[in-house]
Image (spheres, rainbow, N blue to C red):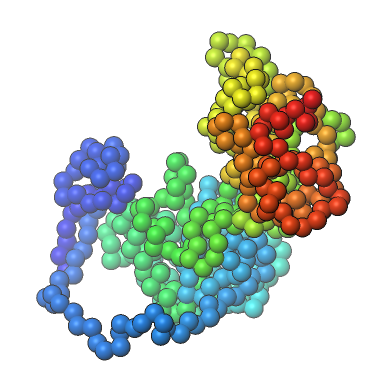
Amino acid sequence: MKQKTLYVCQQCGTTAVQWKGRCSSCGEWNSLVEEVIFEGPKSKQTSAKISEGEIVKLDDINPEDLQRLPTYDSELNRVLGDGIVPGSVVLIGGEPGIGKSTILLQLAIFQKNLKILYICGEESLSQVKLHATRLGGSNENCYMLSETTLEKITAAARELNPDILIVDSIQTVQSIGIDSTPGSVVQIRECTSALIQYAKKNNTCVFLIGHITKEGYIAGPKILEHMVDTVLYFEGDRHYNYRILRTMKNRFGSMSEIGIYEMGDRGLKPIENPSDILLTNRDENLSGIAIAATLEGIRPMLIEVQALASPSAYGTPQRSATGFDAKRMNMLLAVLEKRCGLKINMNDVFLNIAGGLRVEDPATDVAVAVSVASSMHNIPIPHDVCFAGEIGLSGEVRPVNQIEKRIKEAEKLGFKSFHLSTYNKKSITAKFTKIELIFSSTLDALLGKIMG
Ligand code: TYD
Ligand code: MG
């Protein structure tokens, strides 16, 4: 074996033979780290032969039904697309302390019909046992191993042959064949690739826990997310107990699903009806609050948008948004100013999505604009009114997808009126008797209807 020293960018994984202050590929400063790489003898073979029958017609391929094993955890099933797929590799990233170890430890304890091997690279076995006791329950099919060496992990897995292999975390694993520190780009890449090979060969589902960098990406080479089958991010606000499991990539299911949990003193509890908890039960009517009928994946959710607009004490007004894209909020404020005549430019505006949630659904636009207008005019919006619509630059209310699902959810929760775009009319075929649909084509017209 030949030994070679290379400089590897910790950001993008590009290699260089010489150290440089700046990566020539991604432009990151001071990201090149020296790594020693062992090279085996190169194969002399320069051409390969394809044997007969290797190339097949698409029409001739018999699809094997994708086998799925539903887990006990309904939210995890949802984000994975109806359960785990044997032979697949799932990467779960998230901030420290958010609950990555907890969610997979719970799976290991409560999934009694599957054999599970949990690799503890971060905590000692007795620490993990303590957590497990706290979560309650026990599982005689659950095996633990405190190990960080890749070769030992795969050897143990081959010996035990589990249905699920959990590695906590990929950043602690190192291969003895590679002379660089655990957590380095080369180690993460090689160990992941070896674990992927193990998963495919043994038809085992492998879960990898991944740390994230301060920018919020999973630590390691960028290609890590391309290598695995599914990437999930576990997120939430430290000050709230809600945790959201979001799909960033899924070869076996939809990408826009989310799972919602509540972290309690006995672990994570799935939340099946998020609207129930996201809507605060208000007795008084307060201004600056509007309810948005949003959709995350296929699940409708009613969420509370809160805004506060108050005259600015300084020359430059402050704008801040929590749980909503700040650029999008600025765009909506400009639309309110220019198209609806709201004199907002000398006001500080604070926006907050209740419950520590982060929303991306463009249908939230109308509720955001309405909550700001409600706070500006100090006119409360009635409890039983909700909104769904995207807002365009010219102030038009644009239609949103899956409108009937949103209306049904609002009706179920006892809302009496639902504001939506005129252009959504033709996509509604169902009859709604308990909720009134109010159509508007512009934001200005919509505001006129609710605030006079
Ligand atoms: P953990 O799963 O260790 O986080 P990660 O692996 O993402 O770093 O979660 C740790 C946090 O969760 C810690 O602050 C304690 C809290 N927790 C609970 O609130 N309830 C519980 O039942 C458990 C096990 C942890
Ligand atoms: Mg952990």
Residue for point 82% across, 45% down? 436
State left or right for residue 246 relative to residue 46.
right
Q: Locate residue 205, reporting x and y percent.
A: 50, 72
Which quarter of the image is occupied by the C terminus?
top right
In the image, residue 441 sits, relative to residue 350, either above or below, namely below
In the image, residue 156 sits, relative to residue 273, either above or below, namely below
State left or right for residue 418 relative to residue 98.
right
Which residue, as the protein is rendered here, is positioned at the far front?
Answer: 426
In the image, residue 416 sits, relative to residue 122, either above or below, namely above
From where the camera sits, is residue 242 visible?
Answer: no
Q: In terms of depth relative to the viewer, which is nearer, 213 or 440?
A: 440
Q: In terms of depth relative to the viewer, which is nearer, 428 or 337?
A: 428
Mark count: 0
Q: Locate residue 232, reporting x and y percent.
A: 52, 57
State left or right for residue 356 relative to residue 436.
left
From where the camera sits, is residue 286 visible?
Answer: yes
Residue for point 25% across, 45% down? 25
Residue for point 30% across, 84% down? 54
Which residue, as the protein is rendered here, is positioned at the far bottom?
Answer: 52
